[in-house]
Image (cartoon, grey):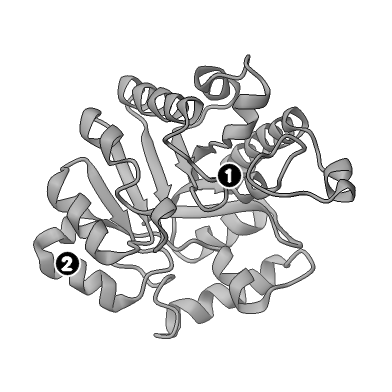
Amino acid sequence: MTDFHVHIGQYEKAYYYADRVFSVLKKNGVDEVYFSSTTSCIFCKESTNIRFSEHERKNAPSASTLYEAIRHEVKNALVCAKEIGIKTHALYWVVPDFHFANCALTIKKAMDDVPYDGFKIHPFAQKWNLKDERTAGLAEEIFDYTEKNKKRIVIHTGVDDFCSPKLFEKYTASHKDVLVQLAHCRPLRQTVYMLDHYENVFCDSSMTNRETIAETENNGLKNRVLYGSDFPITHWREYKPDYDPTEKELSDFFILCITSPGYPAIRQVNRD
């Protein structure tokens, strides 16, 4: 079983260690995961889309420091996965400010630094203003690299215009060999539009209710829905811990999710 939407790393006040996350998934029947690091949500000194107080900016890490921390974090996660015996595919969570603050950090360099198998774009955590020349150029660089190197791009979607499934439509249309995975299917109508118009677009079940998945399948798109749990963000949303959860706590939570109809985001779709 493959989980196409998993995370490790810092999330609010909790840190989700890779060995704990992967062990829980492995014990519960998942043998392959695509993951990215939520540590990428930490704002750096060079962040442009948030207003810092002087105290916050003074204590924030620099873009280069945060980038290096995430690089080591993901590499260590890959080592953990190998020891646990679960197949993993790391996704490079692209933070535009990292690239804008350091002109030497190209997409190619980031992909050479770590054996990433694709990209994660999160227009809510990092606003992607594609009317901005630099941001549009970075998006083109990502899609071009992905197409040439047969990777995938996972894009967070939401109900706001800046998170629309159609936000990157221009790039999706001009790079038809790029596998684009729309996370969360939000909103459904725009997700279905993208699936209908582009054969290279898929969606995943993370944070999505069963009614949405059923309606997607009823549109003749059953084979375009990927299973994604968004684990362990589901755990954080339930408990909002201000500590690092133990493996037992995560395992107990995961089992509860599998057996309870109240947690459709964890339940597998298209098991066959």
Q: Quadrant of residue 48?
A: top right
Name the element at disc 1: helix
Task: Quadrant for the N terminus, please.
Answer: bottom left
> Residue 130, percent across and down?
42, 36
For the residue pair 164 and 199, the one nearer the viewer reads as 164
Residue at 42% in and 53% down: 163
> Residue 167, percent across and down?
35, 45
Q: In the rendered image of this protein, does residue 73 appear above or below residue 115?
A: below
Residue at 49% in and 39% down: 91
Report the amino acid beneath label 2.
Glu
Query: On the rendered structure, is 173 left or right of 119?
Result: left
- How would you rate the neighbour count of disc 1 (Cα within 10 Å): few for under 14, some for 14-19, many for 20 or more? many
Query: On the rendered structure, is 118 left or right of 114?
Result: left
The residue indicated by pointer 1 is: 81
> Residue 169, percent across and down?
27, 41
Name the element at disc 2: helix
Identify the disc placed on residue 217.
Answer: 2
Determine if residue 85 is in view: no
Identify the disc placed on residue 102.
Answer: none
Along the polypeptide, which appears first: circle 1 or circle 2? 1
For the residue pair 81 and 123, the one nearer the viewer reads as 123
- How would you rate the neighbour count of disc 2 (Cα within 10 Å): few for under 14, some for 14-19, many for 20 or more? some
